[in-house]
Image (tube, rainbow, N blue to C red):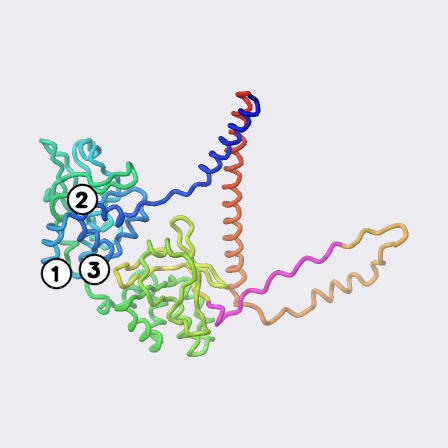
């Protein structure tokens, strides 16, 4: 009997360990809507506008889907893909509204933020949607910039994963002058103007002064371009080093801050790994590593680790993000020299082997102090950057060990509980 209890206890411990280390899988809006063919057009354009991966990254969200007939009516106005993204993002609420909650709204009405509001593209509060529980079991929806007028109504719930994702059908698209406003084509966007207006003027001015780099940026906009723009303080401090580069080196440094593909924030968070840049040319890799920790995305070179601090524009095929440091490629800058290994501790003196006389000790120390510093060192800011990378690695190690400790605690608790039953 005792052996049986011990066996059951071991099985319980293993189960708890597996539960503690299990990975939670996020929802997939595309796969969910594939089960509802009447919404295939809506599903298609969630993918084409790159809204689908952004929806999948959210943990609490409501998608107000419209059927194929309503989508065809919307598409008959021939909106550009960028304008259509704004319109559909207005139909993605950043809160959970299942069928039950829609009929139990506090005070009968609620104002919900949308993905359109979150992009910063919506002027003022025009990216909010008014939801009102009406008489007779109806629930109305209306864009806030229309005075909250209810223009669409709840039809039915398609799929619900409580408090995670709710996909509901509404009767027709939500009209919004702000969302439907024509969006300029990417090739018509003034890259340096966007950067200058949002804290990256020094980088923008430097880019404008480099015809070769500016031409490379402009030529890639229509096909897909993601720019990582250092903020003014960071690039201003870097300018003395930039001026010491050759003309080719200056162009490569600037081109190193952009990739020839469109990467939304959701894509950056899900597609970690090496990324080529506009400066990549055969054996000259000029790449860096994208790595995320929760909501924070970092760009790591062999020399520096920079964090993405904001989004200036994110409209396929163009994205511009701000970063807190200048990206330094190892092709142009030397990595910090590794720290020297500590000298071995002197052997303890014995009776048969007396310690060496101290004569001359001070002289040796003086020689070491007078030794000239190695001139082949990394740039001035490399040691601090190396420290940043060390700190990141240290934090990662702590998090990993912490997870292991949690698992051990689960097992210990299970064992204690089991033995108390014996």
Q: Mark 3 to mark 2: distance in Å? A: 20 Å
Q: Between disc 3 and disc 2, whose residue precedes?
A: 3
Q: Position of residue 39 (x, y in %)?
A: 17, 49
Number of callouts in the render? 3
Majority SS type along the magenta span:
loop
Q: Position of residue 395 (x, y in %)?
A: 51, 49
| Dot 3 alpha-carbon crowd within 10 angstroms: few under 14, some 14 to 19, many 20 or more | many
| Dot 1 alpha-carbon crowd within 10 angstroms: few under 14, some 14 to 19, many 20 or more | few
The image quadrant of residue 235 is bottom left
At 30% from the left and 52% from the top, the residue drawn is 53
At 54% from the left and 61% from the top, the residue drawn is 383
Q: Quadrant of the N terminus?
A: top right
Establish if 70 lies above or below 369: above
Give the magenta part as a residue range.
329-345
Report the residue marked by disc 1.
Answer: 78
At 46% from the left and 68% from the top, the residue drawn is 329
Q: Are marks 1 and 2 in contact (CB under 8 Å)?
A: no
Q: Position of residue 334 (x, y in %)?
A: 53, 69
- Helix, strand, or loop for circle 2? strand
At 23% from the left and 53% from the top, the residue drawn is 46
**Depth-wise, is mark 3 or mark 2 nearer the camera?**
3
Report the residue marked by disc 3.
Answer: 82
**Which label is found at residue 129?**
2
């Amino acid at each position: 009997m005792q052996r049986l209890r011990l066996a059951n206890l071991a099985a319980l411990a293993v189960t708890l360990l597996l539960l503690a280390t299990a990975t939670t899988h996020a929802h997939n809006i595309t796969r969910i809507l594939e089960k509802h063919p009447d919404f295939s057009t809506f599903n298609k354009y969630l993918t084409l506008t790159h809204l689908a991966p952004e929806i999948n990254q959210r943990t609490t969200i409501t998608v107000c889907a419209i059927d194929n007939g309503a989508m065809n009516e919307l598409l008959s106005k021939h909106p550009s893909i960028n304008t259509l993204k704004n319109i559909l993002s207005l139909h993605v609420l950043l809160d959970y509204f299942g069928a039950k909650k829609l009929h139990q709204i506090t005070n009968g009405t609620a104002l919900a933020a949308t993905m359109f509001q979150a992009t910063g593209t919506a002027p003022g509060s025009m990216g909010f949607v008014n939801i009102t529980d009406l008489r007779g079991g109806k629930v109305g929806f209306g864009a806030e910039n229309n005075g909250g007028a209810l223009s669409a109504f709840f039809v039915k719930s398609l799929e619900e994963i409580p408090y995670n994702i709710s996909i509901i059908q509404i009767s027709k698209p939500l009209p919004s002058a702000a969302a439907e406003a024509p969006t300029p084509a990417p090739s018509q966007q003034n890259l340096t103007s966007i950067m200058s207006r949002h804290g990256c003027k020094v980088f923008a001015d430097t880019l404008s002064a480099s015809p070769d780099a500016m031409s490379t940026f402009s030529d890639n906009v229509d096909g897909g371009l993601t720019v990582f723009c250092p903020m003014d303080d960071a690039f201003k401090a870097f300018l003395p080093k930039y001026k010491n580069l050759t003309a080719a080196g200056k162009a490569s440094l600037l081109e190193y801050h952009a990739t020839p593909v469109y990467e939304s924030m959701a894509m950056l968070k899900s597609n970690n790994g090496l990324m080529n840049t506009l400066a990549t040319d055969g054996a000259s890799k000029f790449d860096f590593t994208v790595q995320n920790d929760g909501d924070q995305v970092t760009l790591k070179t062999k020399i520096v680790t920079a964090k993405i601090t904001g989004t200036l524009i994110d409209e396929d095929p163009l994205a511009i993000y701000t970063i807190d440091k200048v990206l330094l490629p190892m092709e142009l800058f030397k990595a910090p020299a590794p720290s020297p290994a500590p000298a071995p501790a002197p052997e303890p003196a014995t009776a048969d082997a007396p310690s060496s006389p101290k004569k001359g000790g001070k002289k040796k120390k003086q020689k070491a102090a007078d030794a000239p510093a190695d001139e082949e060192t990394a740039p001035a800011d490399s040691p601090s950057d190396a420290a940043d990378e060390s700190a990141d690695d240290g934090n990662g190690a702590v998090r990993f060990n912490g997870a292991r400790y949690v698992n051990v605690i689960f097992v210990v608790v299970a064992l204690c509980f089991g033995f108390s039953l014996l």
